[in-house]
Image (tube, coloured by chain):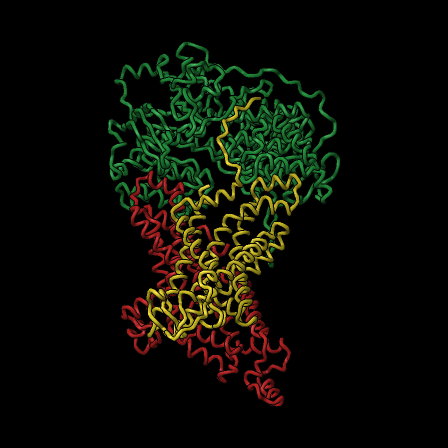
Amino acid sequence: MTEISTPSHKRSRLNPTLARYLQAFTTPKGQIALALIVLLAGVALLAPVIYPQGHDLQTRDSLLPVSWAHPFGTDELGRDILVRSIYGLRTDLALASVAVPISMILGTFLGLSGALSPRLGVLVQRALDIIVGFPGLILAICVVLVLGAGWTALLVAIVVGGLPSFGRLARATLLSQQHQEYVIAARTLGVDKWRIMVRHILPNAIDPIIVQGAVFVVAAVFTEAALSIVGLGLQPPEPSLGILLNIGMRYITIAPFYILGPTLILLLLALAFSLLADALNRTVNRT
Amino acid sequence: MFGFLLRKLPSVAMVAFISSIIAFVLPRLAPGDPALTIAGSDATPEQLAAVRERMGLLKPLYQQYFDWIFGMFRGDLGESFIMRRPVASVIGSRLESTLELALLAMLLMIIIGLALGIAAGSPRSKWARAVLDAMTTVFLATPPFLTGLLLILFLGIFVPILPISGEVGFLEDPLLALQYLILPAVALALPQAAIVARLLQTAMNSARGEDFVDLAKAKGVPPGQITRRHVLRNSLGTAVVALGLRAGDLLAGAIVIEAIFARNGLGSLAVYSVQSRDYVVLQVLILGAVVIAVFIQLFSEIILAALDPRIRLEG
Amino acid sequence: MIAVMDVLTPPAQPLLKVEHLTTTFDAGKVSVKAVTDVSFDVFPGRVVGIVGESGSGKSVTARSIMGLLRAPGRVREGRVLLNGRNLIDLPEGEMRRIRGKQIAMVFQDPQAALNPVMRVGDQIAEALMVHGADAGSARDRAKALLAQVGIPDVERTIDQYPHEFSGGMRQRVVIAIALANDPALLIADEPTTALDVTIQAQILRLLADLGRELNVSIIMITHDMGVVAELCDDLIVMYGGRVVEQGPVRDIFANPRHPYTAALLKAVPRLDTAGDDPLIAIPGAPPVPLRLPPGCAFHPRCSNAVDKCRVEVPPLAPMGDERRSACWVAMAGGDVAPVAAEATMRARHGEREREPALRIEGLRTNVARPGGFLRTSDPVYAVDGVSLEVYPGETLGLVGESGCGKSTLSRTIMGINAVSEGRISVARRDVTAMEPEDRRQVSTTIQYIFQDPFASLNPRRTIGQSITEALNVVGITGAAAETRMVELLERVGLSQDYVPRYPYELSGGQRQRVGIARALSANPRILICDEPVSALDVSIQAQIISLLEELRDDLGLGYLFIAHDLSVVRHISDRVAVMYLGRIVEIGTAEEVYGNPQHPYTVALLSSTPEPNPDRSVENRTILTGDMPSPARPPSGCRFRTRCPIGPAFRSEREICNTTSPDLVETPNGQKAACHFAGEAEPGKA
């Protein structure tokens, strides 16, 4: 009983899952995404260092158009819109970096709960279906209604809004994997349910959830922007991209450049994370 | 089909029931006293009590709920606290604006979504594919309000060819109404259309890898006919399901779009009601949006069954 | 007779002439040769078999001929001449006129090959209309074709959709589409692999009959030497993208001139030999086209290889009349018969134990989905009253076609499906209730070997992690687990180099070995093997079967060996049970059941199984009609009566079969059979 062992080609001992994700950055799309994200996140992080004077420095030059001194112009109180946009970006990214992981983890766990008890899984699924029934902003408005406009409401609205999509992805993985032979094999060996969920099913759910996570960063920022535009998001002294757009809309006919800067930054952000999601998706599906 | 609707009835009723409870309870969970808002902060306790009595706030909560529900069955949606008008007439006066916007946007979503998806899912040259791919990616990444802002900037201000705020009723002056409608409708439709297009494209690509496409090739069927009869016919189901799901988001998108384009529709009514805590109006709007979304999905399931003989509605 | 024809007619021109065909798949800078320098002829009216395992290039050859290569495949060199016209250079528009008109194709999986949203009549008519027929005549011809391929009730079925057809019926529709324009050449790519054995027999007979009637040449692509022997006139054996041997089927079977062909014929279990002579397994696995060994691609697995084989590719050289072979040893006149690495007979454990480790009594399993809120669903018994015992040290083979309930039976024993009625006892303990304590008893006594070694290992966990997990469950941890894991891997023929590897780095056979090692980690007494070799290449099957036999005899394991392949079951089993529609219809020792089957279904199964023996008469075989009924609506009385060749469908006076379900009772021959007229059916008498 001999087995001809094929010469093993050199394998890197790096965690294969992580290595696969890093591969996404070898594609052109992935590289553009990486560059944009590094730029945007870097600027947002370093905002207090680059502009130590803060975003509230008022001058007498109100509503100045685009110039070298003020690349995005100035606002109604003579504040530099570029500085305010960067601080706004900082606010939005901070919000997303708190809300998105919470929503991802919670949603994934809810989606996988069926691995512990099929009844629980169905129950959770029904609950998520109800959330889905409240399309887009209507859900966010309901949350704002209860909690009052502000940080908490936004955070909750984003987290709850993301639960169905993460939950569905995780549940889809669960439903497809729980009949796979290796899961049945683990069950027949007597491996307990928690272990099966964490070791066998969760790793398969991670790919689509990471991709969805990249998409959802954009959705989180857009939820803030949309709510702030209609006046139900953050409130004015706070700098956020949505608030800039809200105020900019009032001056759109006399100072159309006002919303141009924040719009541009939102576009870049959306582009960056969509490209990232795309690159991740291709890499994940290739292997 | 009748059997299918009958079978769906319990779940639709269930969704409507749960949404109605949520729509009823949520606004009442909000902090603050609506009676105080109405009576003014310097009202005497007697005045406050009178306001509460008039608004029916003294009855137990379940009583209020049943009053509301049975009222709705009689066609009485309640009376707005703030505007002091029946909710039905408040909504009625705003309905046309939103209806026109939503219908046009849905039409655009279907046309653009299917066209873009079919174009991207058919054999194309490398360049055409790259352009289509880039278009879908950009539309996909840009939410309605950003599209709206960009449209306002470029087609309303830098090159002023279309009006950017306000509205005209379609029945008064169809041509002018369309001019006002076109930008918001496009802004609302594009991102949803891109989602539909991307899903249709993926479905077509995977259908193209199926054995029955190989069999069609082996029969000698020309490429155009393969795309039409074999690839597209097997992918349309995905598109229909996607359209049904996106319609709800499209309705919700109207909230922001109406704010940006200064239209007086149901979306701006909803925002105003949240700000003024007018929950009598709000509960009807929330319930209405959910029920409409459910019915659109039901409709898409019926179309899906018509497209795919394997799905039988009666089954 | 051939000689007479030669005198009367001038030597026929080949219909199809493939010359030096080389097909590559280019991915970036890497170019993989899937097919290298393949040449052969197909003469009018002949059936040419192309046999090979996965990666041999047999399907790519077929697709190259049809011009149906999937991107990025493309023909690099060579010509494909159809009646003297080179198809490779033809513009796509021209080629389209030939496809479906002069060459047609039948695909492997009839489930996937028909467009699910198009009526079958329209799909046939489309084949006619793209070649110029009008709608009316196309529909008439579609009806005629459906009748010709044996579809009943054409007027109604022509407007049905594919999902309303059974697998066998769908394959008939695909054949009807292929024959629509009276093609001169039919390429059938594994046309029966996805079908059950009784349906396979129907389709093979249909192809043979139609080929003869319509004088169509057929290229039959298959991995099954039995199918070749049954259907083909000429044979082409492919390995590693090249033709290694070609010639008339009878000559090759009688006297193979390539070590691969010779080894393949020896590695396949046969119906007509009992399991005592060990199979001569071919070591290793078929090469992947990306990493072909240098020299002769078969040399790493060849027991006769000489130094020259390792460096130089042998040419396909003539070996006597009409024969060619690509082997340096054969060219030098050497012997190509495989040398068994270890021909030692193993001693079986002596007396079989008195106490069965697994006993099942009157088991019924309801597989109906649980009813909804207001609906109750009728029970569907996929397993309906099955009793059997498995003793340590013996193999009980369980055969049956898909849908007969054999997998549900094994899943019920493992506690995946719930028991509706009956009892399961494991090592003398009644575990029917499947309480936690029962489950522990089951999982320490019984383990499971799965069909698909690709699916039964978690792709994201290393081999070591998979086995360690199994060891941890039975309480072996830390260093003890390390030692035991290496022990287990060596036990199944794998070195400890495999511990850090991921499943995708292993071949199918190696993965199946890992699956066995994992099952052994709990020191079970019984293994349930659910089609353990059917997903493997033919040359690998023998390795796994031998390994299982070795483990059984060394460790005294008992097997419940579930399979649809009767030859494999005969080889490994001591006793055999035959299952049909949820019930056991015959059970006895392998000699009894195979030597003198008593139930007509067993007779039909045996008679339908293709054997690698071209001299076996195929004319008077028992070929069942129709399909197995759904377990949701089993026939009254005897469940087999709707297809039974000696039952009321053919002999109307046999009322008893319609009314009374036969019991499983002992027959004069020794085994038990559930038939009112047991022993009456004989092969070939239907």
Number of disc labels: 0
Viewer-proximal residue, A168 or B7? A168
- Give percent across and percent down for residue C136: 29, 46
- Residue C466 at x, y percent in the picture: 60, 37
Residue at horizontal 58 percent and vertical 72 percent from the top:
B25
Q: Nearer the viewer, residue B118 or C565?
A: B118
Question: Farthest residue toward the top?
Answer: C333
Residue C43 percent location from the top left of the image:
31, 23
Residue C21 vs C73, above or below: the answer is above
Answer with left or right where residue C45 lies relative to residue B63.
Answer: left
Residue drawn where x is 39% and y is 50% of the image: A32
- Asked where in the image residue A1 lies, by quadrant, the reply is top right
Closer to us: A201 or C579? A201
The image shows residue C550 at horizontal and vertical percentages of: 62, 23
Tell me what hue chain C is rendered in: green
Location of residue C555 (image quadrant): top right
The answer to which of C74 and C480 lies nearer the viewer is C480
Q: Is residue B296 visible?
A: no
Q: Which chain is yellow?
A: A
Q: Is residue A279 above or below residue B138?
A: above
Does residue C535 appear to the left or right of C2 in the view shown?
right
Picture quadrant of residue B65: bottom right
Q: Is residue A113 visible?
A: yes
Specify the chain shown as red. Answer: B
